[in-house]
Amino acid sequence: MSIGAILLMIMFFPLNSFLFFQESLISSNLVKADFSSDEKSIQGIVAGAEIMKVEQPAPKAQAVEIPEFQPYRKDGVKDLVIPGAHASVIIDADTGTIFHYNNGRTQRQIASLTKLMTAVLVMEKVKNLDELVTIDEEAVYADGTKIGCPRSGYCISPRLKIGEKISVRNLLQAMLMNSANDAAIALAKHISGTQEKFTDLMDAKAKELGLVDTNFCTASGLDLDDEVAASNCYSSAYDIARIGAYSLRFDTIWKISRLPSNSIISSADGKIQHTILNTDQLLDQMPNIIGAKTGFTPMAGYSLLMAVADPTTKHRIIAVVLDDITRWQDIKTMVNWTFDSYTWR
């Protein structure tokens, strides 16, 4: 690889991404970044590079270790096409290798996929998940999906009440399993005092991780002012995949995401019980699933992030589709294609 190509790649991708160039690993079978035709400008910048890797983000001042195993593409594998998704990305969660990339850096609405960053900050900012949160009016009157109401206007158990005390852990469960907007608001305000201050934390974390196509406006991802949201509240399939890879260091997030529907969470005094459903339709259908996060608003469309391990459970991938009405089938296709097309050694 020429020095000029390396310098251009470093200029294009943030240094926080810790790009690796291991000339000893270069091979015709080694995975290459798969850019869509409308992003040839990116492809041109890295022309001549045999491999582009973006490793799993690590906290500052922590050494980055090169994983023991690297993925190799098998001979004769055809490129993956997901026509129903406006953007789709698959990455190796441990090496950062890009397996599939279509409109990966197109800035789009991501709806409740936002809550994955909210969960990351909860894990980093709250020392004791059994800490109690007092529910206020803003959380209670949140729009969209809420605790007790798995769909807007459809309730199966009591909603949160003003003054109710409930643990951070229970709110995290409701937010991740059922995408409850009131839970996201309550957690954000518990940590930062206001949603606005919390989104500042979200954006700071995004910058720390080297995410260049992301700007958060709310903790829930429910952006009500369409005109403002279109220009100020966005992320990309690639950035979301990076957040997903980073979040895998927090086992609690993903253990919660695998809890079954009809789980019960209670107020601190036990007097109010809320039934929580799980939005993951593939939870019992895919082997080695680590977890998933769904998202939907009319502006964002149907979106999905899924983390899955290979049959050996040693290698993990993150698959993301944005604005994809057939998201569940497409994610299955993406996961199967990846593990059929690559081997680790």
Image (cartoon, rainbow, N blue to C red):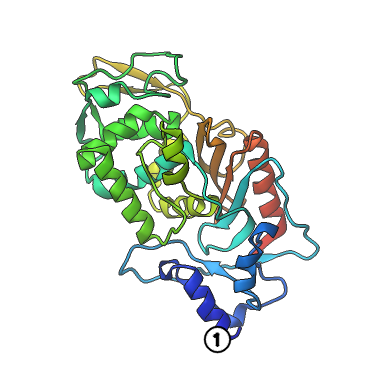
In this rendering, would 59 be left or right of 229? Answer: left
Circle 1 SS class: helix
* Residue identified by numbered label 1: 3
For the residue marked with disc 1, what is the amino acid? Ile
Between 140 and 128, the one lying in front of the other is: 140
Q: Quadrant of the C terminus?
A: bottom right
Residue at image coords 41%, 36%: 256
Quadrant showing the N terminus:
bottom right
Q: Position of residue 229 (x, y in %)?
A: 43, 39
* In this picture, residue 57 sits left or right of residue 20: left
**Left or right relative to 181: residue 196:** left
* Quadrant of residue 224 within the rendered picture: top left
Residue depicted at 20% across the width and 36% down the height:
131
Numbered circles on residues, count: 1
Between 132 and 46, which is closer to the camera in this rendering?
A: 46
Task: Identify the residue at image location x=21%, y=21%.
Answer: 164
Q: Position of residue 187 (x, y in %)?
A: 28, 36
**Which residue extends farthest front?**
227
